[in-house]
Image: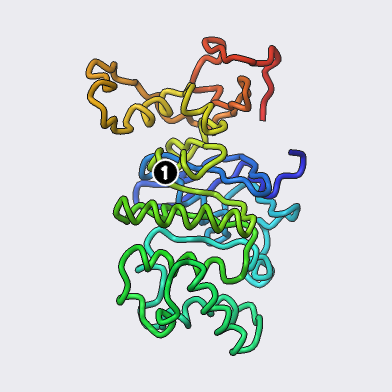
Amino acid sequence: MDNPFVRVQNLSKYFTDRTGIQKAVDGVSFDINRGETLGIVGESGSGKTTLGRTLMQLYKPEHGNIWFNGKEITTLNQKEIRPYRKDMQMIFQDPYESLSPRLTVGEIIEEPLRIQKMGTKKERTEKAYRMLERVGLPRTSYQKRIHEFSGGQRQRVGIARALMLEPKFIIADEPVSALDVSVQAQVLNLLKDLQTEMNLTCLFISHDLSVVHYMSDRVAVMYLGHLIELAPKEELYRNPIHPYTKSLLASIPVADPERRNPYREPIILPEKPLYPPQLVHVGNDHYVSANMINIKDFEIENTEKQVSFI
């Protein structure tokens, strides 16, 4: 699309510690179309969460630009960014850490409405009750505190809080990583239903490739702060190109012993490049890092002869 709903170009976020500068996110670029879910995968420390928080402007980037619904928001201060908050919200990984234990659930999920000065007290309360029911919690949850809930219920409270302002864009940062498998399925199905119902555009962050495959339309792979491969999910899972992507997919547990490969050869990962890699289009909307591999070694069905760069 010519006018993506979210556009990120050359985004970088650095941190400094006793050993020097750590490039948590370095030169990342991608687009997200309206109504689409883009999955971000990578191991712990690859920069996924930092990327999500930088997009939300919780961290100020060192370099790069972020466009949201056609508006460049990178340089906006806290006062200027506040009107955009109602349209872009984040579901955090650990609801017990991100939700205040001192407030009731009603106070927690009404807080975004109070900050944005939306509605009367009665209107906010009624909307809170409706949202609790929408995420599968009883109305009696309104007066309880967060420690009284299970992990899955706490995550539903976090989802309710993020959706209270009826946002257009949601960043879900590992929303089910701390939950049991059965509860994971309930929360994931809830997110998919709400996305369809509210026409949400999503950035879904996870290290679980099965979860990302279920939730996403396209998948982007992060490695040491860099974006190194991007493709529609079926294309990426069927035909991974980058060695790191291959290693991630090879790590997925296989329950059927008949399908396991006990003689799988080890995959040698490249060293982190000095500069952010440029992504090259190799066909089928598949982009891969150009300076970590030799593109000429790969042929993909329906690949156009002319290689284009983004």
Specify whether 146 is left or right of 233. Answer: left
Q: Position of residue 169 (x, y in %)?
A: 61, 57
The image shows residue 306, relative to residue 183, as above or below, that is: above
Residue at position x 41%, y 85% in the image:
143
Query: Which residue occupies 52% across, 29% down?
Result: 234
Which one is nearer the viewer's eye here, 116 or 158?
A: 158
Quadrant of residue 104 in the image?
bottom left
Quadrant of the snapshot with the C terminus: top right
| Image x and y of residue 196, in percent | 60, 53
Compare residues 179 and 207 and report the one nearer the observer: 179
Q: Name the residue type under label 1.
A: Val
Residue 296 percent across, percent down from the top left: 56, 10
- The foreground one among 153 and 38 is 153
| Residue for badge 1 | 211
The quarter of the displayed image where residue 4 is located: top right
The N terminus sits in image quarter? top right
- Residue in the image at 44% along x and 35% along y: 223
Q: Nearer the viewer, residue 145 or 221?
A: 145
- As drawn, 195 above or below 286: below
The total of numbered circles placed on residues is 1
Assess disc 1: are there few (<14), some (14-19) or many (≥20) residues with their C-alpha within 10 Å of its C-alpha: some
Chosen colour scheme: rainbow
Residue 77 in view, yes or no: no
Residue 220 horizontal side relative to residue 33, left or right: left
